[in-house]
Image: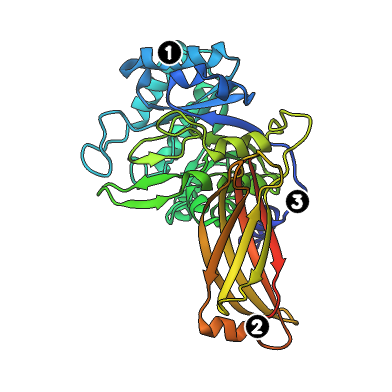
Amino acid sequence: MAHLRLLLVLTLAATALSAGPAHALTVGIADQQASSFSDTRLLALNLRYARYVVPWNAATAQPQKVRTWLNAVESRGLVPHIAFEHSASDRCPNRPCTAPTLAQYRSSIANFLATFPEVKTYTTWNEGNHTLQPTRTNPALAAGYYQELRAQCPDCTIVAGDVLDSGNMTGWIRAFLAALPSPPQLWGLHNWGDQQTGGTGGMDELLALVPGTLWIEETGAMVRLRNSFGRQTASLGEDETAAPIADVFTAARARLRIDRMYIYQWVGGAAGFDSGLTDGAGRLRASYYELQRQLGLAATTTTTPKPIRWKVSWSKARRRQLVVQGTCPVAGTRCLGSATVTLRVRTTRGKTLVTKRLRSGTYATNGAARRVTWRLTVSKKVRSIARRKGVQRAVILRVVARQPTARTSRTTLKVAKPA
């Protein structure tokens, strides 16, 4: 039996980590505000699903709030998805922090199903391994909740285990699986760890741990995150929010077992956690335009505006200075976005000698001034390495454009030998 278990694990890992051909994703929105679904800009995205997180006892604790949200979603033709979590009075990891018993969960679920019979898609428990959930230290109890929900709604689509890609994810999922007689076939992930690092480690790890299908139940561009002590632990500039959206679409489309993804959220501006497609003033962020592009909705004119053109050279006046210049190609058009500039020096055999980030920030042109110029100084050591014979020099630009069209690109420009 041990060798069979090992074979199963290795098969799951190989299936998870192989990069298959890109495939179509079903995309939805996760948002807690009923009013969001009156915004024509959100409706213009033509999303199919909407996800809402409610207390496990919502049917008795806040039925009118749930009904208001469901009415807003259903009136716009979206299919609702409900995820249960701690009660509104809980303050995990502080007290009170009490998980319902299986009997309490069973009774509450029966009440919810009877009160809102139109809902057919559920998540057993939202972010079960999160420090703010009473299930964090009891994955077996969360597995019991799944069995209760499945028993009461056998025809429903149910996400069994839903987790954050944090350090305790692997152990939590293994304990969840061990508490069940057979492994479920639908799982949920909130890939905020991957989104902060730009990687796919959490996504691939969970795919290797579980069978079946994976839904990304929350993802997006995290503009701001503050911990319980008020310290800001993550931040993105308004113009840097397109890249995380592009990255998660690329990653999900390359993994055939991921077939649904929810973008969180529509309304931004909150002081604690903010990943909104709009800011606190209701203005669209770059993440919205990138989502629009990923959904194939960005082309609203017969011709696509040309992006800003870049070139790079060494300054003739200052020997350690690189001059990076961007030109907006069409007179009267504004080019706006952000860019990261990195100098790379390699040997002809591909060994990297220098990788130095020189600048990361925004750019903007207008009708009168079509050009932006950055003069970036390198150290004496870097210049000396760049002057060596037999090396290849390049400047790599990662550009997140907002205007004239939203797009994310990576451009490599060859650089001559410094004088």
The numbered mark, 2 or 1, whose residue comes first in the sequence reads 1
Secondary-structure class at tag 3:
loop
Secondary-structure class at tag 1:
helix
Q: Please indicate whether residue 344 sits to the left or right of residue 52 in the image.
A: right
How busy is the neighbourhood of tag 3: few (under 14 within 10 Å), some, or many (20 plus)? few
When the figure is inspected, residue 187 is found, relative to residue 348, above or below; the finding is above
Q: Nearer the viewer, residue 327 or 22?
A: 327
Measure the C-alpha gap from mark 3 to mark 1. Answer: 41 Å
| Residue in view at x 59 percent, y 19 percent | 78
Q: Please indicate whether residue 228 sits to the left or right of residue 22 in the image.
A: left
How busy is the neighbourhood of tag 2: few (under 14 within 10 Å), some, or many (20 plus)? few
| Residue in view at x 37 percent, y 12 percent | 64
Q: Quadrant of residue 115?
A: top left
Question: Which kind of residue does numbered mark 3 sit on?
Answer: Gly
Q: Nearer the viewer, mark 2 or mark 1?
A: 2
The numbered mark, 3 or 2, whose residue comes first in the sequence reads 3
Question: Which circle marks residue 20 in the picture?
Answer: 3
Residue 194 image point, x, y percent: 52, 53
The numbered mark, 3 or 1, whose residue comes first in the sequence reads 3
Q: Which residue is mark 1?
A: 68
Q: Is residue 12 visible?
A: no
Residue 317 image point, x, y percent: 58, 76
Q: Nearer the viewer, mark 3 or mark 1?
A: 1
Q: Nearer the viewer, residue 387 or 46?
A: 387
Q: Is residue 123 visible?
A: yes
Residue 76 image point, x, y percent: 57, 14
Secondary-structure class at tag 2:
loop
- Are dots 3 and 2 in contact, CB under 8 Å? no
Q: Which residue is mark 2?
A: 419
